Amino acid sequence: MATCRRCAAIEFDDGCIHALGSVQFMINSARAGCAGCQFFLGTADVTDEPELQAILQQCGNGQNGVNLVFLRLDEDHGFENVLEIELRICSIYGVDAALPAVYEEDENEHPQRLIAENPADEDSIDLVRGWFKRCTQHHGRSCALNTNAELPTRLIYVPASDKEPIKLCDTRGQTGQYVTLSYCWGKGKICTSTSLNLSARSKAIPVSELSKTFQDAVDLVRRMGLQWLWIDSLCILQDEDLQDWNRESARMAQVYGNSALTICVDLAGDVNEGIYQVGDEPDCYAFGPDKNRWLQTATEGWSAMTKQALYRRGWALQERLLSVRNIHFLETEMAWECNTAIYLESSPNKAQSPLGFHFGKSIYTKYLHQQLVTPISKASHEDILARISVWNLVVVQEMSVRYFTFESDRLPAVSGLSSALQIPEMGEYFAGVWSYNPFLSMTWCVTGRVGDGGTYYAPSWSWASLSALTPSAHETCVSGKSETEISDWEAWDQQFGPRLIDKKMFYKGSDRRGEVLEGSFITVAGRYRTVYVAERLGEKDQEWYIIRHNEEGVNELGLTVRVDGDTEYSKFDASFIEDWTDLEPMNRGEAKKYICMQIARERKRKEQNPKVLALVLEEVHGNDDTFRRIAILACDEPEADDDGWGTMTLKLV
């Protein structure tokens, strides 16, 4: 196709601004067959404003970023910036670094890699091999894995030749390297193993029975030069009695933690969609005298992670966090994520700092892969708080925004994470909390969707009891506080803090970290008082946290309450006085009488008005001294001589 004179003159060697002409000129040129004008117009919806002028502006002298800018002539004969599109200068392969090298900033001066149209292309697979080699040979202890790790109970054998059949093997007691798969089941037909077909699967698994995602996973493992693959539906028997599932699901920390690589099929919402999807790559245009440079629309990069189908799948959270290495297949590019770095297909040699991204897993490596980093002989109180903080503010909060085919899977889906995070000083794990201080993980409040309130998933005090967004009160478990803040907290804890007296958990299966059955309870001794709660009629409350801070971090005085089962974002008031004389006049519904028990206090300075968190409890009919949680309350810290708080021992279900 003919290239117009303006597009033919694109160079960027001198860092100048390059004029493309008016939108009308570009429309005419595109119709005449100019691929450059077709590309530029395809990046923006501007054809209804033909008078706009377009320029290409390099982000800096010698830099690989280019902005496509559309300008409008204003009344003063100046130009108004109407639209700006980010582009990248690319070569076919980018600039390859020596294997051990990891560029940080200077890669912006080199052409980036052109994102492949098809991730199944040999160049793309070769990039994955290169990332794998760099991580295994040159990253530190955080990414170090035993190449002879204990293999899971069953694995799929992938022979080097695609002429030989794949088969399911019993690998108990064996060692080696294997790959795991993280994907969405969706509504597609899943190839499964059961007691009835186990014998046949051990001889051969017909490729024709595999979904597109499974077929692609087998292909990728083979091309990576590895021979073992773990897929849940095939390696765990999907029998109705769930015996094998209960046993194997309890081993997820080992299955994913020992995996040499996890394939994350982020872009596919269904098992039939496959890993190698073609057609979502960014648009591109070759320019220069030899057509050896390309302009390509910039991608969202790592920030696209939260928009992928796999991100919302409940089980995928622990699969990703437990794995030392992940290869992600996003909608627009591939990405590598390990305990050391994040690499993108568009800039494969540049280590992207996970601190700048939402939920880069390497931030939590020292907690989830402790044995790989710096083992500790004896954990301090602050060490334990740091782990509980990661649990509350990362695992629980992230889990609460994800979806499950079976809502009862919430606790089983973090069983492996709880195992990886736990150290002896944290005590026993049960129903989503830790016996060292289970109350720190009860400071959650409901701020999002709430599922069927009539279905039992966990005890009422557990975050797993509701299918809802449940952020925890941040300042109740943060470590690294000053001596004064710690001393003030200890004084509150000594006088008002709750104590776990006893617990009784009933489990559905053999996994003591898994699904908890109705009838489970804890016995607690603590400080309580009567509280009255009423709805503010006609008002809504969509605050994110139970505790509201101002810009200085100083809390407002007074009570705040959030009701757990509310699905309408209703606003509620609370008072320790029945006639509400301590509150300003409002249009309120009927006040209901409950008791509340203190469970936690913010670790803040006295002048910041630290809040105390209390569970609002409703007595279970027909069971003396047995209560269930119905809300959470934030109140001002009581004075040492406050006699409004009595002492009580009760059972929480």
Image (spheres, rainbow, N blue to C red):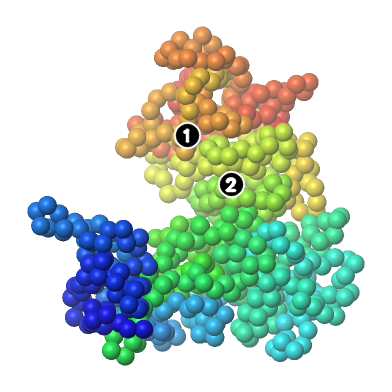
Q: Amino acid at mark 1?
A: Gln
Looking at the image, how many numbered discs can be counted on the residues?
2
According to the image, label 1 marks what residue? 542
Residue 625 appears in which quarter of the rendering?
A: top right
Q: Residue at x 41, y 38 (%)?
A: 604
- Where in the figure is residue 52, as x and y percent of width and height? 23, 61
Spatial distance from mark 1 to mark 2, Cα to Cα? 17 Å
According to the image, label 2 marks what residue? 400
- Estimate how packed mark 1 is, as few (under 14), some (14 to 19) or many (20 or more) residues with alpha carbons within 10 Å: few
- Where in the figure is residue 549, as x and y percent of width and height? 38, 35
Secondary structure of residue under mark 2: loop
Against 367, is 396 above or below? above
Q: Residue at x 47, y 37 (%)?
A: 545
- Where in the figure is residue 424, as x and y percent of width and height? 64, 54
Q: Residue at x 47, y 61 (%)?
A: 304
Secondary structure of residue under mark 1: loop
Q: Residue at x 45, y 85 (%)?
A: 99
Q: Amino acid at mark 2?
A: Ser
Pick the front one: 39 or 636: 39
Can residue 246 be seen in the rendering of this structure? yes
Instruction: Report whether 80 appears left or right of 289.
Output: left
Which quadrant is home to the C terminus?
top right
